[in-house]
Amino acid sequence: MTDIGFVRSEMVEARPAPVRTSGAVAWMKKNLFATPLDSVLTVFGVAFLLWVVPPLYGFFFGNAVWAGGTVEDCRVETAGACWAYIAAEMEFFIYGFYPAQEFWRPNLVFALGALLLAPLLIPKVPYKRLNAVLLLIAYPVVSYILLAGGMFGLRVVPTEQWGGLLVTLIISVVGITLSFPIGIVLALGRQSSLPIIKTACVMFIELIRAVPLITILFMASVMLPLFMPQGTTVDKFLRALVGVTLFTSAYVAEVVRGGLQAIPRGQYEAAAALGLGYWRRMWFIILPQALKHVIPGIVNNFIALFKDTSLVYIVGMRDLLEAVKTKNDSAIEWQSANMATTGYLFAGMVFWVFCFGMSRYSIFMERRLNTGYKR
Amino acid sequence: MSQVSETTIDRSIDTRHMQVSTTEVAIDVIDMHKWYGDFHVLRDINLRVMKGERIVIAGPSGSGKSTLIRCINRLEEHQEGQIIVNGTELTADLKRIDEVRREVGMVFQHFNLFPHLTILQNLTLAPIWVRGIPKVEAEATAMHYLERVKIPEQANKYPGQLSGGQQQRVAIARSLCMQPRIMLFDEPTSALDPEMVKEVLEVMISLAEEGMTMICVTHEMGFARQVANRVIFMDQGQIIEQNEPEAFFSNPQHERTKLFLSQILH
């Protein structure tokens, strides 16, 4: 039998507080020097940063030659990145061989795109439906007329002259916008109870997924004309677009299929029991839930597509990376030790900015769609 | 049979409108058989439900109760025999299936509300897109039924924010918004906490009082006793016995029924 009663006999005297547990010192003690091993690792880490950061800073900023610098500056032994070269060749990196007096046309296309895309991406802005119609239907037509010309007194600019970031953006934007709905339809088709549709979708997806993109681009540009009737030609640019789009849509289809499978049977049944037909069940009930689940996977595919656009150099097109490479090889007037490195760094940074943007936006979207019915 | 319970509703049932039609057939199931692959899951089902009838289907798990009522709105397909609902025979014809589903409401064990839509959107989606009712009107109807199930204040919440009992009441209201002529209940209280069973049963009883034709698969024997005008007992995919609730509970005939009742009633 233990005694569970208790009566305090002595009062506890007040003591000074222990060492501060907040503030920089406490933080360092907890996170950097908690154990001897931690302390050793911290010392090594700091040493590594001291070894790596200053030269990198010097290359990128301190010793870099900025816009307005000359090639002589870049040829100095200690010179860092030759940004002057990038600035001087910027037009080629953006427009390729697009005629200089017509630059206003791609510029207008860029501006219109940004103007229509931004309000669509910001949830609060109203008129989403009108916005989407303008962006998805009117904008492509206007852009095509502006870029290709041949109408309304605009000079014809053949697609062979398009290049640089312009090509990268066109291929990825068109590829993303088209592969998304095609992928959804393929995923639904693969789940269809109609054997012909199902088989066709499975065959398409498995064929495209099992072949490298390079092969598809080659097929599109070399093989396709052999099957076409004599005399008809399909634009090389268009062929590459179709190749990239079909390739990505097969991947998107499989990601979406995963989302469809994650939706409980009860959702399909409840929708059916209410008398909703197949397409309405999919549009209102199944797809909104399924697509929300697979946002990370879909954006993954879009990022991959964006980077894979550089493969179109294989069929002789000059995307951003290829434009940089062309100048690296041919701009003798900028020949210097760091010229090529700077060029590739620039291309890498542009790719990174776009891909990182997509990634952040997808995370934002996921959070937004989640709050709706979190418990 | 731990899921069998006998929640009693301590109020008298208003029977004024609970008349069973003697001429109008709501559902006619004739010599119906169904297989899952090689497994003969429903055998020789004959069931005629008159307009205004309230039928409770009982039986051990795996006896085919749920499968039977899921055949009535073609969530499951039967292979032999006929199922005629409101005069429309169910075949592979999608038009007929949609026709039947418009007039037959269904409430599921796990509610199956649409989690990405608000309660109000859950209730108005089908009236707007299947019946073509204007949005304003559909919302008014939805609010009317939400008031009937006593949760109008939840209209703009999402299903995930509601308790199980509230979700099931929303599910019932969702079906009612289509103004169906028949309601099917597939174990509507089996997934609920005990104290929430009552609020759902109350709604079902008030529906019965209005003369709704109902088929309920349920383990609520109190509900069967008070509300049903016929209890059907199934085992091994067959209808073993059916009778008025009084006779069914006090004087079961078939051995299997006796065994079942002895296990669930104390």
Image (cartoon, grey):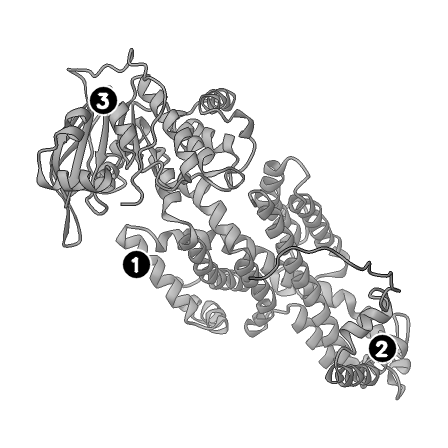
Same chain for marks 3 and 2?
no
In this view, B85 is above or below B58:
above
Q: CA distance from mark 3 to mark 1?
A: 46 Å
Q: CA distance from mark 1 to mark 2?
A: 57 Å
The picture places residue A329, in percent across and down from the top left corner, at 71, 81
In this view, A4 is above or below B265:
below
Amino acid at dot 1? Thr
Q: CA distance from mark 3 to mark 2?
A: 83 Å
Crowding at dot 3, Cα within 10 Å, few <14 / some 14-19 / many 20+, comes out as: many
In this view, A23 is above or below A327:
above
* Res. A150 visible in picture: no
Same chain for marks 3 and 1?
no
The picture places residue B78, in percent across and down from the top left corner, at 17, 42
Please name the residue shown 72% across and 64% down the image: A94
Kindly identify which numbered label has been placed on residue B53.
3
Amino acid at dot 2? Tyr
Determine which residue is flagged by label 1: A199
Q: Nearer the viewer, mark 1 or mark 2?
A: 2
Q: Nearer the viewer, mark 3 or mark 1?
A: 3
Amino acid at dot 3? Glu
Determine which residue is flagged by label 2: A57
